[in-house]
Amino acid sequence: MAGRARRAAELDAADELAAVRERFVLDDVVYLDGNSLGALPAHVPGRVEDVVRRQWGELRIRSWDESGWWSAPERIGDRIAPLVGAAAGRIVVGDSTSVNVFKALVAAVRMAGEDRDEILVDASTFPTDGYIAASAARLTGRTLRPVAPAEVPDALSGRTAAVLLNHVDYRTGRLHDLPSLTAAVRAAGAVSVWDLCHSAGALPVGLDEHGVDLAVGCTYKYLNGGPGSPAYLYVRGGLQDRFDSPLPGWNSHAEPFGMRSVFEPAEGAPRGRVGTPDILSMLALEAALDVWDGVRIEAVRAKSLALTDFFLECVAQYAAPGRVETVTPRAHAERGSQIALRCPDAGDVMRRLVARGVVGDFRQPDVLRFGFTPLYVGFADAERAARVLAEVLAEG
Ligand SMILES: Cc1ncc(COP(=O)(O)O)c(C=O)c1O
Ligand SMILES: Nc1c(O)cccc1C(=O)C[C@H](N)C(=O)O
């Protein structure tokens, strides 16, 4: 064990992102749950206080213009854009991921045309995407077909309207092949919709480069926007004019203050808006994005893979053989930024881990999930988590 702890210290000393940890409020807990709720950036409370006391308290209604409230959804979308490989003007921030899945999927079906009667959905999807896809299928008169992501190329046909996939599986941590799946969907004449909740801020996504049609994601995981912070919607440049939202609101109107009785969609990213943005959460997110100043997403990815490799190595060395099974793929090309381990008593093991200062989470039915946020998790954290896990497993 001393050897691994020494190695962890060496890796931390050589880590180009080590100092970024200082930008967050952390304690002596090993926090491996940033894939559920990212940690608080230290400067956010002060910025939110200014928004509440000065912008709201003193400027009141003037803040829609003077404090930039009205333009926040697109301005913050442009801050997220480089992290997911999108050009400026393609992302709008607002609403929840669930609502954006609905907007994107119905718009995708409308773009695909009347003759295409099937929607494919990731069979292992995070539940909300599956529920929304089922409702979108009912509303648009299409059939919903759950398919494992790897089987999507074989399932595509002239009937396929849209395909909704998760970039990283929330339970297993498996990274799906976005470039090749997107290309296959395109070649079949269908429209791709990707859920980036578990990849944005953890690895390069390359939305523009790979020709993704539509994408959505949350901002409270690896983007550290805070509990319930608004989600975002990406629409590929060439499709923005064809984006026909199923939730047209006054904020997505070409002339919101014209108060017209007939809807006329705005151009560009604002077309993805619905109603009044949630300014307090949105501006907390905007402040939180400052932690990315000077951080390269490629460096984040390299550290994420090194951390998860090191954690797996420590678990293999410390835990009794066969006590846990690794669910997350070993191949880097198939791994997101979390490690999922399976054991029959996972719920109980996670409760005891949390009690000893190692916070991950339990996912039904038997998965221990450890999320590695490279901005604030270090190699010593990974070593300590594996050591405490082995102790807990040995008792159980
Ligand atoms: C892949 C994925 N999609 C969607 C969601 C959640 O959607 P919402 O932000 O609407 O709660 C989550 C996590 O909560 C998720 O992991
Ligand atoms: N969004 C969450 C929430 O409001 C409460 C608790 C957890 C969450 C999550 O984000 C769960 C997460 N998407 C998951 O991958 O399991």
Image: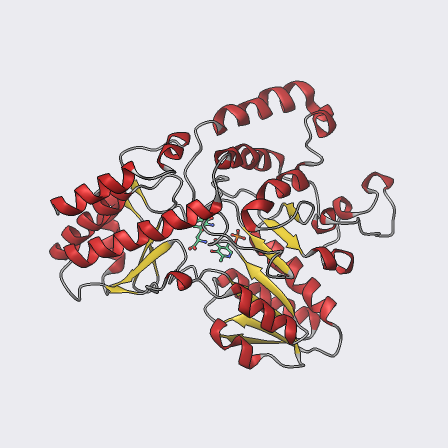
Q: Is residue 161 visible?
A: no
Residue 171 vertical placement versus 156 (above, below): above
In front here: 239 or 298?
298
Q: Position of residue 41 (x, y in %)?
A: 44, 32
Q: Position of residue 285 (x, y in %)?
A: 54, 37
In front here: 187 or 213?
187
Residue 184 vertical placement versus 288 (above, below): below
User: Residue drawn at (59%, 40%), measured in percent from left and top?
Assistant: 79
Residue lying at the far front of the rendered structure? 14
- Left or right: residue 246 versus residue 57 is right
- Left or right: residue 309 versus residue 34 is left
Q: Is residue 300 visible?
A: yes
Residue 37 vertical placement versus 99 (above, below): above
- Left or right: residue 38 versus residue 218 is left
Q: Position of residue 71 (x, y in %)?
A: 70, 36
User: Residue drawn at (20%, 44%), measured in percent from left and top?
Assistant: 7
- Left or right: residue 18 versus residue 393 is right
In front here: 393 or 222?
222
